[in-house]
Image (cartoon, rainbow, N blue to C red):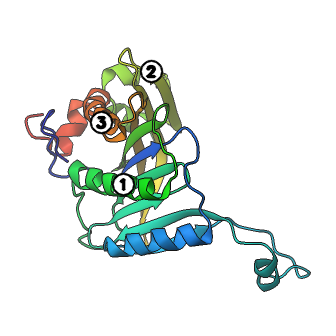
Amino acid sequence: MADTEHSLEFDNLPLVVVEMRLFTAKPVITLDLRTAARLEEALAGNGMDAKAVYNERDFTEQNPPAAAAALVPPTIQQIVGTDLTRSIHVTIQNDMVKVHWQKMPVANPPSYPRYNALEQQAQWALNLVKTMASEISYINGIANMTYSNFIAADASTADAAFRILDGRYRDAIPPNSVQLHEINLRWRQPTGLDRALYLAMAEQVFGNDKSGGFLLRTITGKRIADDDPIAAMRLCHSDLQSFFVECTSVEARKKWGQKDA
């Protein structure tokens, strides 16, 4: 993982998901069948496998799927495009664009392609939505960005969690704890950006193998004030880089191979 402003470089950061989301204050497109088809075609033209995700409906014997579909148009929840070569996913909802990278559970998976690759896909998706919306504004919308890391560890003791966090955040763990189940903290910075820290026991599955440890999720977000969602996302990214260093211990970052840690 790298950032030119904060110069973060790791040799073996246990990163599993990087996600950015951009929300409008209200829905700006209607995900009907026609719009869904246009979005799928555009995503396919962008080199992605595309599919519509439908809201689940309750079907009974008296109302089988075929008959129901003929009477009631299916409700589309979102359109998802996937670039398997880079493990980048683009999701479009009526009020949101999401771009995320997810580590694939395969041998030699594609590495995280860095922030700029995700931003480029987000900008492409924003432009696409703009062509389909009669009116669109991101003012009072929300931008947020998340890093999720799976840290293999003996989670049977709270000491393992202590070693992940910096001292300022260890105070969230009572000193007499035998085992940490979950920490979930959310607050607002003086800068107006929101931060969230989530640390919980977790399992990672690779084929038939399971490994235990902790899921560490760090999030920053902000209200979009000037109708420039990408500028807001860049602020979130910059703050997230700083936040990640602040909340993790020097010991942990050295273990993950941070340069100059």
Tell me the tag on residue 188: 2
Could you tell me which secondary element the residue under label 2 belongs to?
Answer: strand
Horizontal and vertical percent position of residue 121? 31, 57
The residue labelled by disc 3 is 231
Label 2 crowd bin: few (<14), some (14–19), many (20+), radius 10 Å = few
**Residue shown at 70%/71% (left/top)?**
74
Between 211 and 55, the one nearer to me in the picture: 55
The residue labelled by disc 1 is 127
Q: Which residue lies furthest to the left in this view?
A: 260
Mark 2: amino acid: Arg
Label whose residue precedes the other's in the sequence (1 or 2) = 1
Q: Are marks 2 and 3 in contact (CB under 8 Å)?
A: no
Horizontal and vertical percent position of residue 220? 39, 33
Q: Distance between the residues labelled 3 and 1?
A: 15 Å
Does residue 178 show up? no
**Residue shown at 39%/70% (left/top)?**
43
